[in-house]
Amino acid sequence: MSVGIFDSGLGGLTIWDAVTRARPDLAVTYYGDNAHAPYGVRTMDNIHDLTQAAVHDMWDKGCDLVVLACNTASAAALRRMQEAGVPEGKRVLGVFVPLIEALTERNWGDNSPPREVAISQVALFATPATVASRAFQRELAFRAIGVDVEAQACAGVVDAIEDGDMILAEAMVRSHVDALKRKMPTPQAAILGCTHYPIVQDAFQRALGEDVTVFSQADVVAASLNDYLSRRPEMERGGQSRMFTTGDPELVSARATQFLRRPLTFEAA
Ligand code: DGL
């Protein structure tokens, strides 16, 4: 049973890349819902329904554990799916909590009361749906006090990345960072709260300046998944590594190969 990594499109590949580099022995199934990307401009109900359908397909394809490597899907669907109950032996996890644990210097599953942390001014960059959900601020409030979060909804960045237009994506990053800085001139840290954004992480860092610590999810989530699997070894009982897309497999394979500079082949979901 392979471990499943889900995203609306290509962004979750940043998590897939870190996971497969950290654990080359692990069977991992990637699933991109490219036919419906971007999710970040859809309604919460629509994102929930698309995420639920894809996760059920992944469970049917033999993944016992599915990681929503998509903040937008995590914000809109994770809690709702977990509360509705998942089938016997199946699990679904999100990507917010590991990132917030890193920001607030906590170990996995540390549920002690919220406390003061070193960082007090945080810029959050995410999709319009993730920003509107306030899920990041809610999870942060459970763990830290006194952190001021300014959120910037980065409309258009995911579309440009999915289209392979990196010049447009980087120009949009610069304009979203400018907009954020008008609201919070000197953030100490920036959270890239969308798994597509590590693909343009250098553009974020350049626009923010060297003094700003940029947190992105890939390595943090890979470490957290490894930790989870060491406590739940039954979730990784072998299986085959495969890559599925609801979009055009040829086009998606070409874009994925371009982004990760690793030859990747997708098949139709
Ligand atoms: N990579 C996704 C995320 O982490 C999202 C984007 C989208 O489809 O808008 O939010």
Image (cartoon, rainbow, N blue to C red):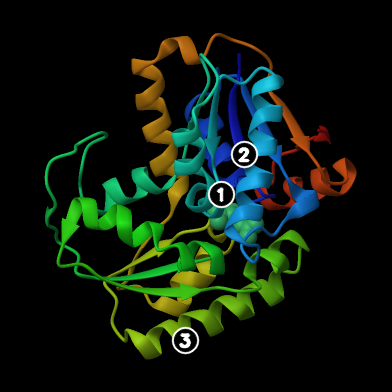
Tell me: residue 15, above or below residue 62.
Answer: below
Residue 70 falls left or right of residue 268: left
Disc 1 + disc 2, Cβ < 8 Å: yes
Q: Which residue is mark 1?
A: 73
Q: Identify which residue is drawn at 73% across, 45% down.
A: 33
- Residue 4: percent from left, percent from top: 60, 28
Position of the C terminus by quadrant = top right
- Which structural element holds mark 3? helix
* Mark identifier at residue 6: 2
Q: Identify which residue is drawn at 48% across, 52% down.
A: 75
Tell me: residue 206, above or below residue 265.
Answer: below
Q: Nearer the viewer, residue 226 or 60?
A: 60
Q: Which residue is mark 3?
A: 179
Marks 2 and 3, how far apart at CA:
30 Å
Identity, as a three-letter code, of the amino acid under mark 3: Ala
For mark 3, does the 10 Å Cα neighbourhood hold few (<14), some (14 to 19), or many (20 or more) residues? some
Q: Quadrant of residue 212?
A: bottom left
- Residue 170: percent from left, percent from top: 62, 74
Residue 127 falls left or right of residue 214: right
Residue 195 appears in the figure: no
Identity, as a three-letter code, of the amino acid under mark 1: Ala
